[in-house]
Structures are given as C-alpha cells and as structure tokens.
Image (spheres, rainbow, N blue to C red):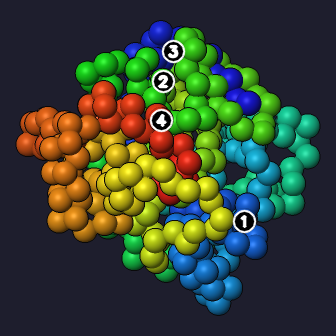
Amino acid sequence: MIRIEIDEPTLARTRIAISPLTEATVSLYLLQRNPEVVPWPYDGWARRAREILRTDPATAPATLHMRLPSVSPDFLSPLPTSPLPTIEEQLDELRDTPDDVIDFQLAKHYPDGDLPEIMRPFRDDRRAALARLADGMQAYWDAAIAPYWPAMRAALDEEVLLRARALAADGPDALLAQLHERIRWERPVLTLIKPLDQEMEAVDQRLLLVPLIFSRGALMCSGDHPEIVMVTYQSRGAAVLADGPPRPAGQPADRLAVLLGRGRASILRALTVPATTTGLATALGLAPSTVSEHLSGLQAAGVVHRRRAGRRVLYGLEPAGVALVNLLGDSARTEFVS
C-alpha cells in the first residue's frame, strides 16, 4: 500500500487535471503488465499499439517506460502544470527539464550514485536523452493514441466536470472518499491499495488528482515535485477504446441485467456517480439516443432523478436505484470500467 499523510493546507489545495503525457506513459505500462492478452476494452487498441511499436522505429525511445522499475523519477513523465495541457506542451516541458530537477531526482532515487544503465543517458548526455524520449513519445502518441484522443478527451472532460462539481459542492473529504474503490480516505491519510509498500507526507503542497482512461486500476502516486503530489485513478469512459461489447467468459448471471435489460443495468451502475447523457454515452459506448431512451424509462420507474447544473443536465440515482445496484449489481461489476 501507498500511504500519503496529507496536511490541511495540501488538502485545501486539491485540484483536478488531465494529462495526455501521463495517459501515453500509462498505456505503455498497460502493455507491459499484460504481455499476453490485454483485457477488454483495451484489447483491440493493444493489438494495434503493439504492431505500431514493432514496426515504427520512431516510437522505440518510448519503450523506455516499459523497462523502468515501479518507482522511477518523475521527470521522465512530467506532471501537468495546467488543468488541460496538450501533449505538445507536456513534451516541450519534458525536453526543457531543468538540470537541477534531474540532479535532485536522480540523487533521491539513486542515493549511492549507481544508476541503472537505462538511466545513465539522463546523467551523461541529458539534453539528447530528453529529446530522444520526447520525440519517441510524440511518434507513439501520433500513431497509437491521437486517433482515439477526441473521444478520450470528451470522456475525461466529463469526468473532470463531475469531480470538480463534487469538490466545489461537498469539499475534498467527500471527493476523496468516493474517488476509486481502491483508494481509501481516512483523514489525514490517503491510502492507495496496491502491491507496493511506501509512505510519504504531503506538507504545504497541492494534491493533484489526474483521471486516466488507460489506468485500469493501476493507481500511481508522484511525489518528486516540491509543490505537488499527484495521484492518478481510473476514469470512467474506457469503453471509448473498445472495438465492441465485452465477450462473456463464464461470468455469473447478471441479475440486474436480467431484471432491467443489459443497457439499463449498465446505465444504473454508471450512475453511482452522476453523469450527463453525453457522458454516459461516451463512457458506455452507447448511442446518445439509446441512453436517453433508457434514462426516460429509469426515471419513470423512480430509480433515477434528473437535475440541472448550469447548462448541463445531470442524472443520478434515487434511493431506490441505489438499493437496486447494491442488492443486484455486484455480479457484473467488470462490465463497466470505472
């Protein structure tokens, strides 16, 4: 587990951002962690991405991220410095990483000065090494991720909107308590449940939450920045990468789908966090008209409510809907990537 003790000033500065570069980096981790078969909804994308990495030599430097240990210097994938950076902006920051940042992080991670071979270029010929890595990540992004980015960006925008609304309405405690099933908030400690034993303190910093389409539960924490602690988590909307619906694989019967139908059951599960029609359509890979039809039926049944938030209309669960999901919804949790 990673345990982060967060003081009040850091908690009060909680912010949310997207990070195209972190998406690209984590997508490479996903391929590395699943060398044989990448699960739905990433399977079709993964086959194409592996072929790109195999046949396009310009992407070769990007594979550095597939060879790094689980804890590595943050400068290899810089934290976002604005809420909605572009990949080009983040790669320019990578190329221009200050020498003192590199020196500090190398000394922190390798205090004895014995750097792994793959890290030595960033000490001995760092400008060239950073340029190679940035160029390789750009080539990988252009070929493997850019075609999907408009749909991914729409899903991430929806995620940020909903989380920012929760932060503004209910405060950081409520936001962190509902962030992810493997993130626990017990003030003042934020715990990321993963097979890594690490403890850190966030004192007078800023907590930056970054939702990722490619995370698939691979929670990350970046603590090298003197002013920011970044925590990533799985965003809804990964279904935008899918070639089609998930294939059943001997899973137990989906009792909620038996009762309501597959489409309405998936929408009901998704609405454990309020969402718009467009956001649901993007997250679940359904047509907006289909989602609207299902929402009308669920609203008429009294399990879903409709609320206006500025220019947007958000749908959420009524108590009866919460009860249905809690009672019948566990048998097919993997159907919706959350």
Q: Looking at numbered disc 4 in the image, what kind of residue is underneath it?
A: Leu
Instruction: Tell me the residue that label 3 is attached to.
Output: 204
Q: Nearer the viewer, mark 4 or mark 1?
A: 4
Answer with left or right where residue 16 lies relative to residue 176.
left
Marks 2 & 4, CB-CB < 8 Å contact: no
Q: Earlier in the sequence, mark 2 or mark 1?
A: 1
Numbered circles on residues, count? 4
Instruction: Tell me the residue that label 4 is attached to.
Output: 327
Q: Residue at x 45, y 29 (%)?
A: 178
Q: Looking at numbered disc 3 in the image, what kind of residue is underneath it?
A: Asp
Instruction: Tell me the residue that label 1 is attached to.
Output: 34
x then y, percent, for residue 125: 73, 61
Q: Looking at numbered disc 1 in the image, what kind of residue is underneath it?
A: Asn
Q: Earlier in the sequence, mark 3 or mark 4?
A: 3
Marks 4 and 1, Cα distance to the nearest angstrom?
33 Å
Q: Residue furthest left?
A: 311
Q: Residue furthest bottom?
A: 55
Q: Residue at x 91, y 46 (%)?
A: 114
x then y, percent, for residue 338: 48, 48
Taking 207 as reference, is 222 above or below it?
A: below
Marks 3 & 1, CB-CB < 8 Å contact: no
Q: Is residue 10 visible?
A: yes
Marks 3 and 4, Cα distance to the nearest angstrom?
42 Å
Q: Residue 177: which numbered mark, if any?
A: 2
Q: Looking at numbered disc 2 in the image, what kind of residue is underneath it?
A: Ala
Q: Residue at x 36, y 59 (%)?
A: 261
> Looking at the rendering, in which quadrant would you find the N terminus?
top right
Q: Earlier in the sequence, mark 2 or mark 4?
A: 2
x then y, percent, for residue 66: 72, 63
- For residue 318, which quarter of the picture? top left
Answer with left or right where residue 282 lies relative to residue 134.
left
Q: Secondary structure at mark 3?
A: loop
